[in-house]
Image (tube, grey):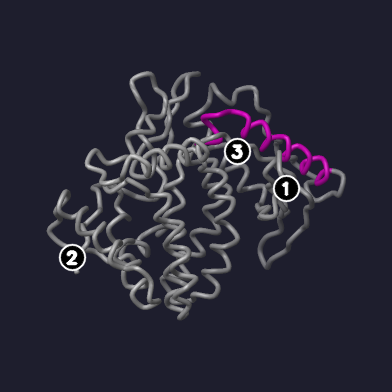
Amino acid sequence: MASPEHPGSPGWTGPITQCTARTKQEAPATGPDFPHPGPDGHLDTHSGLSSNSSMTTRELQQYWQTEKCRRKHVKLLFEIASARIEERKVSKFVVYQIIVIQTGSFDNNKAVLERRYSDFAKLQKALLKTFREEIEDVEFPRKHLTGNFAEEIICERRRALQDYLGLLYAIRCVRRSREFLDFLTRQELCEAFGCLRAGQYPRALELLLRVLPLQEKLTAHCPAAAVPALCAVLLCHRDLDRPAEAFAAGERALQLLQAREGHRYYAPLLDAMIRLAYALGKDFVSLQERLEESQLRRPAPRGITLKELTVREYLH
């Protein structure tokens, strides 16, 4: 079996490359998982497709139709349903429960997450560094000198923070930014990948399956951003001796990487899928041919396994 290419790139620090905005006109995010902007600043959807792709004409047509559907704007609704006071030995704070629902259709994968006021404050500080002009009309609810734990103040702030998230999401460059995505998903992803590295696969899987639907909705403009998390799901299922579930997660990831042979996950993922297909009695030959063809076009000095690549995500 051909060994997969080494996909790493110098200076890469995570699965999402930050969107930079210095003026009112948005600069789309780029990087290993984002398509590159075209000459007019718009996302160049063709950049993800290998110039040497071996896909047939029919497969290419299906690919672009799928890409067109994926990159339609997914509209989300943010609701802060409740808040509670939590006390610890040396601190006391309010935890807000955020519910994120896709509008326009029945959403059976609504996301539920919890954030403290300090998390919202960190988001605001980070956004001001990059999007100061874009969010100048977005009011951030300030902290009171006293009475922060009064029921009336908590209810008022809960409504204000809900409006704050809705206003941020309405700004295209903000909702596509790393800062906004990290606020909504990074805590859970960091814990999940930490559990994966520690071999705590059931807990890692629980967290991943909870956060993945939200991550996919937030990155509909760049589907490959969800590939690391899907590969982590594959690894958890595989190491829990659930090859069929692992293979299904891998198929989803491969679909997102369709025709993107240059992506750092492409070869390691194919290699893992070949082994799973063989173990399940599925067609592994076509997967092996894809891997070998890819490596003929992009020879690499040494290979890296899918697990070696995936456990490097969300280290900080």
Q: Which mark is residue 78?
A: none
Tag 3 secondary structure: loop
Task: Name the kind of residue labelled 3 in the image.
Answer: Val
- Disc 3 packing (10 Å; few <14; some 14–19; many ≥20): some
Quadrant showing the N terminus: bottom left
Q: Main secondary structure of the magenta part?
A: helix
Closer to the eye: label 3 or 1: 1
Tag 1 secondary structure: loop
Task: Name the kind of residue labelled 2 in the image.
Answer: Ala
| Residue shown at 44% from the left, 48% from the top | 225
Disc nearer the start of the sequence (3/1): 3
- The residue singled out by tag 1 in the image is 106
Rounded to the nearest whole Å, what is the CA distance between mark 2 and mark 3? 39 Å
Do the CB atoms of the residues marked 3 and 1 lie less than 8 Å apart?
no
| Residue shown at 45% from the left, 70% from the top | 246
The magenta stretch spans residue 57:
no
Q: Nearer the viewer, residue 297 or 191?
A: 297
- The residue singled out by tag 2 in the image is 2
Residue range in magenta is 153-176
| Residue shown at 35% from the left, 25% from the top | 38
Where is residue 153? Give x, y as percent.
Answer: 82, 43
Tag 2 secondary structure: loop
Rounded to the nearest whole Å, what is the CA distance between mark 3 and mark 1? 13 Å
Q: Nearer the viewer, residue 173 or 278?
A: 278
The image shows residue 12, relative to residue 5, as above or below, that is: above
Where is residue 248? Give x, y as percent.
Answer: 47, 65
- The residue singled out by tag 3 in the image is 74
- Disc 1 packing (10 Å; few <14; some 14–19; many ≥20): few
**In which quarter of the view is residue 35 placed?**
top left
Task: Name the kind of residue labelled 1 in the image.
Answer: Phe
- Disc 2 packing (10 Å; few <14; some 14–19; many ≥20): some
Disc nearer the start of the sequence (2/1): 2
